[in-house]
Amino acid sequence: MENGELEKLLIKAYTQADYSGDVFGEFEAYVNPNEITLAYEMEYDSSQASGTTNSRMEFKKVKPGDMSLSFFIDGTGANGVKIDVQQRVEAFQTITGYNGDIHRPNYLIVAWGTLQVKRCILKSASIAYKLFKPSGEPLRAVISATFTDNSDDETRVALAQDESPDLTHARIFAAGDNLPMMCYQIYGSPHYYLDVAEANGLDNFRNIAPGTRILFPPLEK
């Protein structure tokens, strides 16, 4: 944002799960939200030994997070922009809702200033009409929407910077790397290089071409 210019909340829709291809459409909020709620949930497995009263909570994963926001659509012209409220509501529904061409809701990017959820989908939405003309035409509406993180597992793990050996890791083999040393960095021991080589179908672990993507799966020690 430069020279005090208003940064408007923008929702972009895609039809491809990997967010490739052309943008299906965009929705721009003329009046930005005054509150955004980010929610996330941890998932645990509870295990309890025989004869005990307390359960042990074993961490499993961080579930995809939610982002909830509400914003106004004002058709009175009070903010200097005269808009058709119902038309803007329908535009929001078209961008975020069900797309018959792909038989599911669109894949979304919701961005506003430094707060950005690069990959998400609409979880729920409600529209409250607040003001009407005598003819019944709406002049104001409030859209309340909740979006759920739609990042793929590999992206989510990368963002979380997980380094635990009980998670699958992906590394790009670079010049000067060697498999035993990479195993030491991930598993704490170089002795798992044959297991990793087998998991990746590598016939010669001493002759890995730079740029090769190698998966380091969870291994029992």
Image (cartoon, helix red, strand yellow):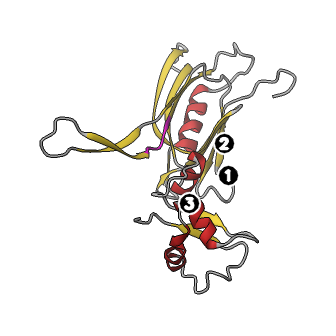
Give whichever of discs 1 and 3 has the lower sequence position: 1
Distance between the alpha carbons at the discs numbered 3 and 2: 42 Å
Label 2 SS: strand
Q: Position of residue 117 (x, y in %)?
A: 61, 40
Residue at (58% x, 56% y) in the render: 15
Mark 3 surroundings within 10 Å by alpha-carbon count, few (fewer than 14), some (14 through 19), many (20 or more): many
Apparent side of residue 116 relative to residue 97 in the rendered image (left or right): right
Nearest to viewer (mark 3 / mark 2): 3
**Amino acid at the residue labelled 2:** Glu
Magenta part of the protein: which range?
A: 62-66
Please name the residue that numbered disc 1 is placed on: 23
Mark 1 surroundings within 10 Å by alpha-carbon count, few (fewer than 14), some (14 through 19), many (20 or more): some
Q: Nearer the viewer, residue 10 or 45?
A: 45
**Amino acid at the residue labelled 1:** Val
Relative to residue 77, is residue 88 depicted above or below? Answer: below
Q: Which mark is residue 26?
A: 2
**Amino acid at the residue labelled 3:** Ile
Residue 124 image-quadrant placement: top left
Label 3 SS: helix
Residue at (75% x, 17% y) in the render: 80
Nearest to viewer (mark 1 / mark 3): 3
Give whichever of discs 3 and 2 has the lower sequence position: 2
Majority secondary structure in the magenta region: loop
Label 1 SS: loop
Q: Which mark is residue 186?
A: 3
Q: Position of residue 34 (x, y in %)?
A: 60, 19
Q: Nearer the viewer, residue 142 or 152?
A: 152
